[in-house]
Each structure stands twice: as structure tokens, then as C-alpha cells.
Image (cartoon, coloured by chain):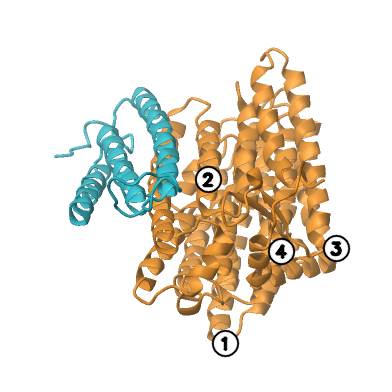
């Protein structure tokens, strides 16, 4: 179980970083989103993996750590807002710069494969 | 009385919300309310400064949860003095926009400014590392909006870089915080300090990795090499009052570096003691050098000033990396000076640019200014102070930092700072003489600088004079702060021994 989760986080982070290094704004935003998924999963896992344990004390002998679950909710909300903001910003940059390159370069001198 | 500590967070929040409700037609009213709120904020923070001055730490447990559970706000000397710095800076930046001909920040400039203050004040006060992340996000979101309010291709491009970089930074921050929580089981910084000191040897490398990841994040906020490339374009494309306010943003990064690497990973952290210092010291010096090169090569006045901000960050972090009480005291003195003076320079640059007409902020000869003598003298005073020439406060700050270094560190620091100051002197003489002396015969039709804008600039420079005149007291005070910061045991005790209030 731990190995599976680690591999998922690694793949998400890897894809996220690859996409963030692209030259167009849309892949960069997708990359950031993937990275934030990986981060959210990582925060969640930091409470250790358990199954069938409630996140409240006093119900049974076993309980899951509730704090990472609260943290991950906060992180999801903030990440969601930031992604929305970034999407609007990218659209505005596309309108004002005339292209969707992150450096706002002209289409002619820009040859991303 | 006991609720005073949370006022620097609540006051900007409520003002910001209230300002959103006021119809935009009533510009005067919006302005008055906004300024009034910052005056009130300044008074509150001054009162907090007096409270902190007694040496007692004030711990405010939100929701009355006993630490280390729940979120705490902690007021010590360091946070108190930075709160005063923020509120004065906000007051003068807002005062600058009073005049009609000054670029008005557009629709929700004032409420966004107060939300920015909310984030900055919260970051200075909080004693919880995840809460620090939340306040970082608040101040960043406000800063994105402030930066991108106005249209323009340059602004959109600089803004895009700024936002993407900071979002990446936030992701790394979360990874570091989550890893620290997973390994120590706490988010309270005081409690974490105790647990890091006795961390199991098997976990130590992971904790160290998280700590260095945090340094990366704070370095991005503070504009440390190699993470400063976003700063010059961003600051230069922001409107003047926003750029002046942003002078505090890099200092938030410096503050968090001081706080985290003295409290959690400081002298008493056992196996992980001072683990950031070997990284911080060379990076700070390289930041200094690149800042000086940037200032020398800058083609535009505002870019040059932005590089001066980077230089101040390098100097500050070099002072932090020396890791002694004397050096930290000197660093804090320099921090106060450099924040006020860089804000003054950004405001002054805006006045100069509006009187120059077509060349705007290009450092080329252009039409004569409308008020060359007044603006020239102000520029001269700012330049002397920011370079660190006697008699103004920059000199005192730099001399104190240089004095605090010893051994081989002293050699490196003296060489870098002194040769760098020469470079800054050259750079500023070039821009100053080009703008004020190598002028054409013509003048452009420009309005005289507004009295309120000038008052704001005078006020900010006045702090530099104040730091010079009452230098003795200021140095003594900053040394007191450093003493408190370098002995985190007191902070840890105050937080962990805090008892919930017994109410009815």
C-alpha cells in the first residue's frame, strides 16, 4: 500500500514538473495542478496509512490522525482558488501579449517542439 | 486588553471588507477610511511594541485551545517591531495616493492593500507553521491582485512569472510542512523546536531535507540567489504605491528565515543545529554581488531600485548567516532602514518619471524636470542612505554588520560589501547625474508634485534621519530583539506553558 501511494505521488510530481517546464501557459497550469494533487496526497499520507479507522478519538481503539485531513482540505481549497486565478491570468496574458508563450514571445521566433 | 494581539489581523480584515461595500464614487470617503484605519493600526502596533518591550512574550491562543493544540499568535519584540514597520509603511504608501493626479490604484486598491496587510501582520504574529502558510497565501493573493490590477503587456508577463513561481513555492512549502508534521507530529513552532532537538537519528536526514526545502521557499520570498529573477521586472512594473508596499514582502521572507532558523533549527536543535547557515552565507554574498551588477547594468530607474532591494536582501541574509547576537541586532537595524528607504525610492521614482515625460524611467538624458532642486535633493538623500554613506542610517547599519563579522567571514563580507557599495555609488551617480544634470533645455508640461505625495516621501526619508539621530536607542533596541531571538528557550516556555483562560 505504502509503495503504491509513493509511486503515485512520484509519478504525479514527475509529470507535474515536466509540464511546468513547458513553454506554453496551459501545460504550465496543468503541471501546477498535477503538482498540487501530488502535494495533497503527500499531506494526507503524512498522517500514516490506516484503513477502517475513524478520525475521531474515543470511538474505538484505533483512530486515524485527523490533522492531515484538515490540512489537506485547506490546501485543496487554496490550491483550487489559485488555479482559478492563474487560468484567468493566463487568458488575460494571452489577450494582451497576443500569444500563449510564458515569456510572451512572438510566434515566429518561438519553436517549441 | 488581552485581545489586543489579534487586532493587527482583525483591523485590516474588517477595513478591507468595509471598503468593498463603500460605493466607488465616494473616493474621498474610501480614502479617509483607509488612511484612518492605518493610523489606528499604527497606534495599536505601537502599543504592542510597548508591551513587547517589557521582555514578556504575549501568547494568544485562538479558540482558547491549550498549546500545542490549536493555533497560537505570539508577540515578541521581533514581531512587534516588524508590525510597526508594516503599519508605518502602509500609512505612507496610502498617503501617497491622496492626490488626484497620482495613479490611483483603480477599483479595489484600498481593500486589497488592507488584505495584504492582513497577510503580512498574520505572518509576523503566528506561532504555527501551517498558519504561516495560510497567511503567506493571503498576502500573495492580495499581491497578485494588486500587481495585475492595471492593464498592460509588461505587467501581464511579469505577473504571470510571479504567480507561477509563487504557486510552485507554495507547493514546496506544503511538502516541507507536511514532512515536518509527519516526522515530529506537531505544527506549533515552539513544540516543533523541542521535538526537532530530540529527533531520532534515522529521521534526522528527512527533517533536514524538509528544513532545506523551507529555506528554498523562504529564499524565493526573500529573493535570494538563484530565486530573485522574478523581482526586478515585477517591482518595476507595479505602480508606485504598490511597489512601495512590496518593500515589506521580501522582508517577510527574511523574517521567516530568522524565525524558523533560530527557533526550530537554531543553536539548540541538537544534531540539526544551524543546518541552513552553510547554505545561507555563500548565497547571501552571491546575491549581494549579482545585485550590484544588476544595479550597475540597469537601463531603467525602477529596475535599478529593484536591484537595490536585492542588495539589501543580500546584506540582511549575510548578517543573519553570521549567527551572533551582535550581527542579528545590526541586521534588524538595517532591515528597518532598508524597508523605509526602498519604499521612499519607489515613490520618488514615480514623481520623477511623471515630470520627465517621454523618456519615463529610461536612464537617458531627457527634458528638464519641473522641480529639479527639490527632487534632486530628495534623490540625493535617498541615494546616500541606500548606498550606506555617512551620515544617514544606511551607513550605521552597514558599519554595524561589517563590525559584527569576524575571522574569514569578515574578509569575505568586507570585500563584498565595500566593493559592492562602490558599485552602487557608481550606479546611482550615473542615474542621478543623467536624470538631473544632463538634461535638454526643454521642459515638459507636467504638474508640480503634489504636497501629499511629497509628504509621504519626506515621512519615509524622515525615518532614515530618525534612525540616525536616535541611532543609539535604535541599536540598543534591535540588540534587545536579537538577544530575545537568539535565546529561543524563553519563547518555547512562554508558548508551551500558556494556560487557557478560565471564563464563565
Give the quadrant of residue B98: top right
State whether discs 3 and 1 lie on one chain: yes
Numbered circle sitting on residue B333: 4
Q: Chain of mark 1?
A: B
Alpha-carbon distance for marks 4 and 3?
12 Å
Tell me the residue at 36%/22% (across/down): A95
State whether discs 4 and 3 lie on one chain: yes
Whether residue B289 is visible to the viewer of this picture, yes or no, is yes
Give how far across and how far down residue B107 sits, in percent: 60, 21
Alpha-carbon distance for marks 2 and 3?
33 Å
Which chain is the one coloured cyan?
A: A
Q: Which residue is mark 3?
A: B470
* Picture colour for chain B: orange
Residue A96's place in the image compared with B95, above or below, is: above
Q: Are marks 4 and 3 in contact (CB under 8 Å)?
A: no
Mark positioned earlier in the residue sequence (3 or 1): 1
Q: Which residue is mark 1?
A: B407
Amino acid at each position: 500500500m505504502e509503495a503504491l501511494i509513493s509511486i503515485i505521488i512520484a509519478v504525479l510530481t514527475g509529470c507535474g514538473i515536466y509540464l511546468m517546464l513547458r513553454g506554453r501557459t496551459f501545460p504550465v497550469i496543468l503541471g501546477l495542478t498535477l503538482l498540487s494533487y501530488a502535494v495533497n496526497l503527500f499531506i494526507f499520507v503524512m498522517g500514516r496509512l490506516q484503513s477502517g479507522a475513524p478520525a475521531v478519538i474515543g470511538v474505538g481503539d484505533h483512530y486515524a490522525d485527523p490533522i492531515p485531513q484538515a490540512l489537506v482540505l485547506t490546501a485543496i481549497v487554496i490550491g483550487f482558488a489559485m488555479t482559478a486565478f492563474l487560468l484567468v491570468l493566463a487568458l488575460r496574458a494571452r489577450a494582451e501579449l497576443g500569444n500563449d508563450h510564458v515569456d510572451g514571445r512572438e510566434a515566429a521566433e518561438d519553436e517549441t517542439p | 486588553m488581552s485581545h489586543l494581539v489579534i487586532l493587527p489581523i482583525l483591523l485590516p480584515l474588517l477595513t478591507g471588507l468595509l471598503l468593498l461595500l463603500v460605493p466607488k464614487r465616494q473616493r474621498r470617503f474610501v480614502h479617509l477610511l483607509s488612511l484612518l484605519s492605518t493610523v489606528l493600526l499604527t497606534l495599536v502596533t505601537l502599543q504592542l511594541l510597548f508591551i513587547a518591550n517589557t521582555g514578556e512574550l504575549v501568547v494568544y491562543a485562538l479558540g482558547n485551545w491549550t498549546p500545542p493544540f490549536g493555533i497560537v499568535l505570539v508577540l515578541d519584540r521581533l514581531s512587534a517591531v516588524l508590525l510597526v514597520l508594516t503599519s508605518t509603511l502602509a500609512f505612507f504608501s496610502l498617503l501617497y495616493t491622496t492626490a488626484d493626479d497620482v495613479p490611483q490604484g483603480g477599483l479595489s486598491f484600498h481593500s486589497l492593500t488592507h488584505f495584504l496587510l492582513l497577510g503580512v501582520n498574520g505572518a509576523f504574529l503566528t506561532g504555527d507553521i501551517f498558519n504561516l502558510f495560510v497567511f503567506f497565501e493571503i498576502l500573495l493573493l492580495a499581491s497578485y491582485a494588486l500587481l495585475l490590477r492595471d492593464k498592460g503587456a509588461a505587467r501581464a508577463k511579469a505577473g504571470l512569472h510571479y504567480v507561477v513561481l509563487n504557486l510552485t513555492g507554495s507547493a514546496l512549502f506544503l511538502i516541507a510542512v507536511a514532512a515536518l508534521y509527519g516526522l515530529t507530529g506537531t505544527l506549533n513552532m515552539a513544540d516543533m523546536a523541542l521535538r526537532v532537538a530530540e529527533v531520532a537519528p534515522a529521521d534526522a536526514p528527512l527533517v533536514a531535507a524538509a528544513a532545506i526545502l523551507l529555506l528554498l521557499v523562504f529564499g524565493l520570498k526573500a529573493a535570494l540567489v538563484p530565486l530573485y529573477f522574478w523581482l526586478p521586472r515585477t517591482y518595476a512594473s507595479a505602480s508606485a504605491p504598490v511597489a512601495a508596499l512590496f518593500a515589506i514582502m521580501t522582508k517577510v521572507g527574511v523574517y521567516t528565515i530568522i524565525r524558523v532558523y533560530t527557533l526550530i533549527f537554531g543553536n539548540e536543535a541538537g544534531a540539526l543545529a544551524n543546518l541552513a547557515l552553510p547554505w545561507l552565507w555563500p548565497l547571501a554574498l552571491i546575491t549581494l554581488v549579482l545585485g550590484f551588477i544588476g544595479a550597475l547594468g540597469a537601463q531603467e530607474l525602477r529596475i535599478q531600485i529593484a536591484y537595490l532591494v536585492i542588495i539589501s536582501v543580500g546584506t540582511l541574509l549575510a548578517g543573519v548567516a553570521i549567527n551572533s547576537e551582535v550581527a542579528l541586532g545590526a541586521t534588524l537595524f538595517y532591515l528597518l532602514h532598508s524597508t523605509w528607504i526602498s519604499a521612499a525610492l519607489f515613490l520618488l521614482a514615480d514623481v520623477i518619471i511623471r515630470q520627465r515625460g517621454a523618456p519615463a524611467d529610461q536612464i537617458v538624458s531627457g527634458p528638464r524636470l519641473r522641480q529639479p532642486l527639490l527632487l534632486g535633493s530628495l534623490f540625493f538623500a535617498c541615494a546616500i542612505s541606500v548606498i550606506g554613506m555617512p551620515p544617514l542610517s544606511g551607513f550605521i547599519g552597514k558599519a554595524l554588520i561589517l563590525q559584527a563579522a569576524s575571522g574569514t567571514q569578515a574578509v569575505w563580507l568586507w570585500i563584498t560589501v565595500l566593493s559592492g557599495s562602490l558599485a552602487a555609488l557608481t550606479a546611482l551617480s550615473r542615474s542621478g547625474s543623467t536624470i538631473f544634470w544632463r538634461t535638454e533645455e526643454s521642459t515638459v508640461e507636467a504638474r508640480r508634485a503634489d504636497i501629499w505625495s511629497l509628504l509621504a516621501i519626506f515621512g519615509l526619508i524622515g525615518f532614515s534621519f530618525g534612525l540616525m539621530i536616535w541611532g543609539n536607542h535604535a541599536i540598543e533596541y534591535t540588540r534587545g530583539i536579537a538577544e530575545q531571538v537568539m535565546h529561543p528557550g524563553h519563547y518555547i516556555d512562554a508558548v508551551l506553558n500558556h494556560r487557557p483562560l478560565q471564563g464563565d
